[in-house]
Structure formats: structure tokens, C-alpha cells
Amino acid sequence: MRKILSVFCMCLTLGACSQLGVQPWERGILAQEDMQLVSDPLEARLDDHIYFSKEASSGGASFGGGGCGCN
Amino acid sequence: MQLKQPKGKINNLLAVAACSLLNQTGSAQEVPGWYIDSAVLGYSEKDRVDAIEPVVSATRVFEDGRKLNLTFVADSLTGASPNGATISNAPQTFTRPSGLGIYTTEAGDLPLDDTFKDSRTALSAQYDFPLNRLTRLSTGLSYSDEYDYTSVGFNATLARDFNLKNTTLSVGFAFANDTMDPEGGIPVPLASTALPWNQQRQGDEEDKTVLDFLVGVTQVINRQTLMQFNYSYSQQDGYLTEPFKLLSLVDGTTGETSGYVYDSRPDTREKHSLYWKTKYSRDNGDIIDVSYRYLWDDWDIASHTIDGRYRWNVSDKFYVEPHIRYYNQQEAGFFAHSLVAGQALPIDASADYRLGAFNGVTIGSKFGYRLNDRSEINVRVEAYEQQGDTVGNPIGVQNNYDMFPDLEATIIQIGYSYRF
């Protein structure tokens, strides 16, 4: 619970901080395809499948993968 | 002819610039049109599993900001998978999971079930649309089918922009219902493989549900930096046992194997994870991508995952992206390499190496080449290795063997994308 509260507080801090961010006309770099949070969705999807099959952890960046009886 | 290329580039730049004014992250994939992404993954483990996985994804971005994605995946797996039994100083003979036939593992070798063969097809659809100027809803359906396993799922995520679209708050959930009907039926958890076949089996089919929640914040830090924080919660209920896995029963003094029982896991699992990611564009245009995930659950598993990529834009057309990933996992509370014969059986026990204690390291690189303004081809080559720890004290002859033999795999992916 303490971890969850920490993240929540971090989020609130981020949201409230007006120093962060850019003006709409300053997004040139952020708009590039290779600057997207997931720049290659297929690679991310394939990796999720590999690591879901070989490790006991999944998800985090998005929903947790799965949908297979990988053994 | 020479005039066409600059014109295309200017159009692209204008489109990206327009998107960057309209959207929070303003990706190139916000420009209306069709986007086709395809890839073939080859995954090969040394002496174990081989997999080929082609995937095709089509995305249609509409003028009004709606977006529809359809993805098709097919994979084919062959090879051998550890059955959970420990290495022994004598040959070991196992009945195949179907009950038909046997296979034998030589003394000193890791028992592998070499009849592992499966193929899977999966379809998913995701529809993303604006509810108003600042809010988007993304909904999706997924279906996956293989010989003995079927999964049906749906998801929904609401995203709201704040602070001049510099902050995005996302809240979502996903639900999946999985059904498995392994050939030979469902084993009775912790039943001895020496029992008559009908006493080892408890039916033909089992299912489980998976419910995921995710809350995330994406924050633009400055013109070159983007950050993401997520908290996820996952609740699994139902049959979470691995029907093809065994545990060895060994003598408490000599460590010699005297029999086998089936894997048994709790019928619920609660998982939590914290995730942080940062993307930073250097002044020279190269991009650093770093993420960390901490995951923990009520099976006593805890893991750390650190992932780093460096996109080196060698030229306008060519890039190289080295990648390193480090994974560390603490074992499940009920994980055991083997059980001692004659002692009372625990409520749950599993020798599945994936629930053990290990480190996983992935190292490799991706190479991408833009053929023109509309298409790109890329190749990824990576090596993945798991090195495990021995949990508890080995007994007798077990001291002579590696209780967690390394897993070594090669990952090769070839991708091609095209925009109409």
C-alpha cells in the first residue's frame, strides 16, 4: 500500500508541476515516430509473448499479455 | 522525378507538425491513412523449444482522429520442454501427458518432454476514438486459439489530457477467460504418476479468468523528454496449475528419485507492478529509452526488470538500436526442485523453472532502414540467457548436478512496415 501511495503522490506532483511540459509549438521532437512511448508495437507484442512464456512476470507497460498455454 | 521526393517530405513534415499541435504525443501514426506492420519472429532455444511467429497488423487512422487496429498472429512451436523432474543419477522413464507412449531421459540429463508441438492463431481488434477534445476511449477484443487452449478477452482504457496536453492520465482494465483441455485430461494436483491412469485424472477441461487494472500517467518533461508511470493490478482465478509439469519424489538421504507427482498451484494469484519509462532525445537526434518494472505477487514472487535501448540514427535512412534487458526473479513460495518421498505433501508445489529464482539477460540490436518515406525494413538479433539459482539445499546425488541448467535462446526478427 505504501508503494501505491508513493506512486499516487508522484503522479499528483507531476500533474501539479507547471514547470514541466512544453507549448504546443514545441512538440516537434516529441512528435517523431521514434519518440513514441512504444515506437515498435509489434516488437513489444512479440517480446511480451516471449517473456510471458519464460518468466513469472508480465505486463507493467500495458496489460499483461498471455492468452496462451505456453509451456 | 526529382521534384516528387522533396514534396513528399514536405507533406510529411507538415502532417507531423499539424499532429504535434493537435495531439498529446502527436505520433507520425496520427496522420490519417493506412499503416501496415508485419514481422516474423524466430525464437530458438538451445536443445529445447523452437518457435516461428509471423504477425501482421493493420491500422486505419481516420480524419476525425478515430483509429482502428487489427492484428493477426500465428505461431508454431516444436521441440522439448523441461517436464519439472529433477536430474537423476539413473535413467528416468515418463508417460507422455496424453497417456499414450513413454519417453526416457538418460542419467545426468535434464528431463525434457520432446513431444512438445503446438500451433496458435490469435486475432485482436482495437478501436480508439475521441470522446471530446481531451478524452479518448480505447476498446479492444482478443481471441487466441491453439490445440488445447483457447482465450477470449476484452479491454477498455480511458485517457484524459491535462496541462496543455503535457500530462495524460490513463485508467483501464482488461478481462480474459482462458479454457484448456489438454490431451489426456487434467491431472489431479500432486497425484502420483504411479497411480492407475483414471485416478491421476480429474476431468477434461479447466478454465481461468484474468482481470487486469492499470492506472498510468504520461508526462512531457521538456521538448526532448517524455516519462511514463504505471501501476497495474492483476487478479487471476481458476486453474493456474501447469498440467504438463511434474515434481520428483527423492530419497531424503541419497537424493535418488523414487517417483513423481503432478504440479499443484493455488487457484488465485494477485499481482502488482510499478512501471517507469523515460524517452530522451539527445541533441544529435539519437534516442535513449530506459524502463524499470518492479513486480510482486501473493505467490511470493518478486522481480526487477531493467530495459535499455539506444537508437543511433546513423543517417536519415539507417539506424542501429542496441538493446539490453536485465531480469531478476525471486522464486515462488511453493517452488521446490523436488519433494522428499515419505514426507507429507505440501498443499502446493511446483518445480517449473519459470517459478524458480533466476536472472535473465537479453543482449542484441536492431537495424532499421527506411526504403522511402512510406516504408521501412528492420532486423533484430538478440540472445537471451537464463541463469538460475539452487533453491534450498540439494540432497545427496543432487549435489552432483546443476539444479537449474542455463537456458540459452536466440531471437531473430525481420520486420517490414508500409504506410498508404
Image: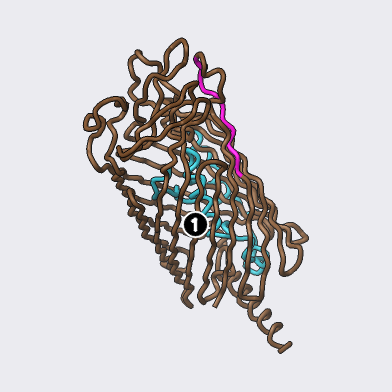
For mark 1, does the 10 Å Cα neighbourhood hold few (<14), some (14 to 19), or many (20 or more) residues? Answer: some
Closer to the camera in the image, B310 or B387: B387
Q: Colour of chain B?
A: brown
Q: Give the percent coordinates (x, y) of residue B85.
A: 43, 28
Residue B59, relative to residue B410: is it above or below? Answer: below
Q: Give the SS element for disc 1.
A: strand
Q: Amino acid at mark 1?
A: Glu
Q: Residue at x 65, y 69 (%)?
A: A25
Magenta segment boundaries in residue numbering: B384-395
Q: Residue at x 48, y 65 (%)?
A: B56
Q: Is residue B341 left or right of residue B215?
A: left
Closer to the camera in the image, B403 or B100: B100
Q: Colour of chain A?
A: cyan
Closer to the camera in the image, B308 or B366: B366
Reading the image, the residue beneath label 1 is B53
Residue farthest along the right direction in this orientation: B284
Residue B282, relative to residue B44: is it above or below? Answer: below
- Image mark count: 1
Residue farthest along the top direction in this orientation: B253
Q: Is residue B196 left or right of residue B118?
A: left
- Quadrant occupied by the C terminus of chain B: bottom right
Q: Residue at x 43, y 34 (%)?
A: B83
Residue B22, relative to residue A11: is it above or below? Answer: below
Q: Give the percent coordinates (x, y) of residue A46.
A: 51, 54
